[in-house]
Image (spheres, rainbow, N blue to C red):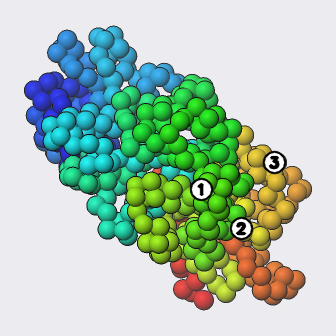
Amino acid sequence: MIPVSCFKDKHVALFGLGGSGIATAQALMAGGAKISAFDDKSDPCERARAAGIPIADLHHLDWKRISSLILSPGVPLTHPAPHWSVALAHHHGCEIIGDIELFARERRQFMTSQGWNEQDCPVIAITGTNGKSTTTALIAHLLRSSNCDVEMGGNIGTPILALGEMKKGRIYVIECSSYQIDLAPSMHPTLGILTNITPDHIDRHGTFTHYCALKERLMTQSRQAILTLDDAPSRAIAERKKEKITVSAQKRLDEGWFFNKSHLFKVHHGKILPIVGLDHITALRGVHNGQNALLAMAACEAMGVDQSRLQTALQHFPGLPHRMEEVGRDGPLLFINDSKATNAQATAPALASFEHIYWIAGGVAKEGGIEALKPFFNKIRKAYLIGDAAQNFCQTIGDSLPVSLSMTLATALTQAVKDAKTDMTTKQKAEEAAILLSPACASFDQFTNYASRGDAFRLLVQNLLRSR
Ligand code: ADP
């Protein structure tokens, strides 16, 4: 835990008692703050109370004495409407911040008290619309393989304030969502990494411009930024940022890092250096993972890690569950769990990664549905549609490719396997093909979250392969 001492002897209000809320409350208490915590649901309040956290309805606080409202990132700050706790804090002129901001303040205070400089307590902050978790996990893996002392967390895994305490040379690798950045105005990372930007979470940020501005703020406040040049908003941010390294998974650059034919290259002073191939790294299939690998390798090099070590470590990256995760293989037939792909932008790279696809998609559709995926339809042998979006997706597909309204994941898998086997034994020889769950949808019509959907798929595949 990182005790937050910058609120010592002060009274703070805290709203939102999910995983990061409890960790934040404990870190504040450990640092000597007096806190009053609350949640709209009773279960989280009970869990927090059992963990020794004082619970109080924030309506009844004496707000004149409250220094700050610490808000969980999942709670609406501005859109669709400010949460009542936000309105209360505004009414009393009280600042509203999140756990990443607490970390940033604590880090500054701690570095000053120890006489440390930036290298003594480096922070790598990763943001972007897609690829944040993969890039974060890959950077942590590469640094650890090079014997660095690494703490990884934030929007991935462990809440930031539940990470190990600050030690000289320890590197914090932190995934930051746009919600978290919104609540962290003074986060100044050593390295800021922007994976890409496409429209997302507009319901929470009001406009795409505001969403981009939040990502940009983190890059502006980073000592050095590593950015992709593969989409217009990221390019615009890169143009405005001085201290930067640029990467592209789409085109050769004159300076920076690029990806071509499954290989990473670095260009320095006009000289092109081949770095490493990703061909046989199953956890890093596809051009999108080329982008993630470029960012991660550039980040580690910027941290001063030896290139040769990184190349070997890259081969051993285990990948993350639910992101292009190979959950089974039956001869040339692969079973891929990409349940984390909850929008069309995230599904596009999965479809781009295979040539012959039996595609399982559907759930709760995002705005735009699967329109953007039409260019990939010629690689799909058949689509198996599930959940609320099934009828709607069926209309978008029209007669471009064969479709089955499977409705459930289990039916979709059974039908896909049957079709794949028939194709293999009849017309299609033994080409590699993929049964791909990459839903382009949220999961909550049929599952608790994307992870339970992916777990269900993995289990179905394992049972199916076992019964053969
Ligand atoms: P995030 O943490 O930003 O949601 P993840 O690494 O968890 O990103 O990946 C989420 C989904 O996005 C996966 O389905 C994956 O296939 C896709 N994805 C991963 N990296 C990228 C990228 N660089 N560009 C576009 N899509 C990506």
Quadrant of the rendered image containing residue 356:
bottom right
Q: Which mark is residue 396?
A: 3
Residue 179 visible at all: no
Horizontal side, residue 347 vs residue 429: left or right: left
Q: What residue did someone put label 1 on?
A: 268
Q: Amino acid at mark 2?
A: Lys
Question: Of the residues shown, which amino acid type is indicated by label 3?
Answer: Thr
Element on which disc 3 rests: helix
Q: Determine crowd level at label 3: few under 14, some 14-19, many 20+ residues with C-alpha closer than 10 A.
A: some
Does any portion of residue 80 appear in the rendered image?
A: yes
Q: Residues within 10 Å of mark 2 (few under 14, many from 20)?
A: few
Q: Which residue is mark 2?
A: 261
The dot on residue 338 is none
Q: Quadrant of the C terminus?
A: bottom right
Q: Is residue 354 left or right of residue 90?
A: right
Residue in front for this viewpoint, 285 or 23: 285
Instruction: State left or right for residue 441 relative to residue 462.
Output: right
Q: Nearer the viewer, mark 1 or mark 2?
A: 1
Choose the circle earlier in sequence order: 1 or 3: 1
Mark whose residue sits in front, 2 or 3:
2
Q: Earlier in the sequence, mark 1 or mark 2?
A: 2
Left or right: 456 with respect to 18?
right
Along the line of sight, which residue is nearer the eye, 399 or 240?
A: 240
Q: Quadrant of residue 418?
A: bottom right
* Label 1 within 8 A of ligand 1 by Cβ: no
Q: Residue at x 67, y 68 (%)?
A: 262
> Would you call the spot at circle 1 few (<14 residues within 10 Å), some (14-19), or many (20 or more)?
few
Secondary structure state at the residue bearing disc 2: loop
Query: Who's the residue at 47% across and 75% down the image?
Result: 312
Amino acid, disc 1: His
